[in-house]
Amino acid sequence: MRSFVLFLTILFSNALFSSDINIFFTTPEKKESVILNALCDFIKSSEKTIDVAVFDLDNMKVAEALLFAKKNGARVRIVTDHDNLSSNAVKKLAAEGIEIVSDRRKPFMHNKFAVSDSKRVWTGSYNFTDNCTFKNNNNAVMFESGNLAAVYAEEFEEMFADGIFGNRKDSSIFGIKGKDRYYSKIGNTDVNVFFSPEDNAEHIIVKMIEKAESRIDFLSFVFTSSPIAEALIKKMKSGVKVRGVFDGSGAKGTGSQYVKLVLEGADIRIRKGAGVMHDKVFIIDGKRVITGSYNFTKAASMKNDENIVVIGSYDAAEIFTAEFDKIYSKSSKK
């Protein structure tokens, strides 16, 4: 099974390790995009509803897929960041009568998720743009789960219907409060979802790192979080192997933890070349994956609307590790 999963990942940059979970990666070196085609299929197959919360949307193929869903009777709603309302794709959608809500504030509505028919969720690091599709390294995960869809739908409604950005109103989805509200069992896979800033995603990531026993791999577009860096350093001193890939621009940015981690002995590479390394991923002990829209920064922790998903699965970790190794092997130490 695992060899088949990895075969799919390497050749097609998508993998199915469960009938209810699919993982996709961008292929900046190729003209045809599996992740884009999968997203459009996800949207077009919506029969009743498709709700999208995405920082940036400029890809016209995605816009056409949303219009296709609307034409076929699905209710289509969009939340996006105020700074990105001017793209031709968003203007076209608005002109065709699709209701679009923006945050109208300086911090970013930085999510990249969609909920279809109250039973399917798409999330990850992938903006619905030409750059993120054809130039940048990104990932997306698609889940078949009514429980998970309800969690994301509640976050969407807070932004779209209630105009609440940057925090969560008190609620009790499923009549349950606390951590169980974010948990779903999909087949044999444990999935936890957290939203920022209300759920303190930085603290969640630190706690996951503290549980590491042997190795941690990470992919980072921007990494300025001192608490996350300190947690990694502490684990390295206890014998845990840490490897990471920074985007070139992120490594040089103000507050970057790149130099600190290198000096402390982490095996860090720099992704260079066209586009950017836009992933935000931790892979822990080959059995747990953290991904989503959340850059490892103070703004993501304290101001922006973000989400992370924690996937407890050896198979998912193996798929993400294959992608990590591919990016790592093409990156340099300086």
Image: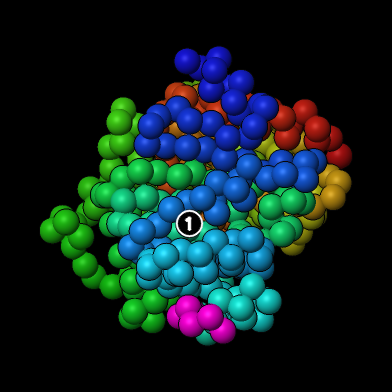
- Answer whether residue 31 is visible to the viewer in this image: yes
Q: Exactly how many numbered labels are in the figure?
A: 1
Taking 104 as reference, is 143 above or below it? above
For this view, does 263 lie left or right of residue 310? right
Kind of residue sitting beneath label 1: Lys
Residue 223 x, y percent position in the rendering: 65, 52
Which element type, helix, strand or loop, lies under badge 1? helix
Seen from this angle, which residue lies furthest front? 72
For this view, does 178 lie left or right of residue 116? left
Applied colour scheme: rainbow
Per the image, the residue denoted by label 1 is 44
Q: Residue at x 28, y 37 (%)?
A: 185
Label 1: few (<14), some or many (≥20) within 10 Å?
many
Q: Nearer the viewer, residue 85 or 218?
A: 85
- Answer whether residue 179 is visible to the viewer in this image: no
State which region is magenta. Answer: 95-101
Q: Quadrant of residue 61?
A: bottom right
Q: Residue at x 84, y 35 (%)?
A: 332
The C terminus is located in which quarter?
top right
Q: Quadrant of residue 171?
A: bottom left
Q: Residue at x 46, y 69 (%)?
A: 71
Taking 325 as reference, is 279 above or below it? below
For this view, does 82 lie left or right of residue 271? left
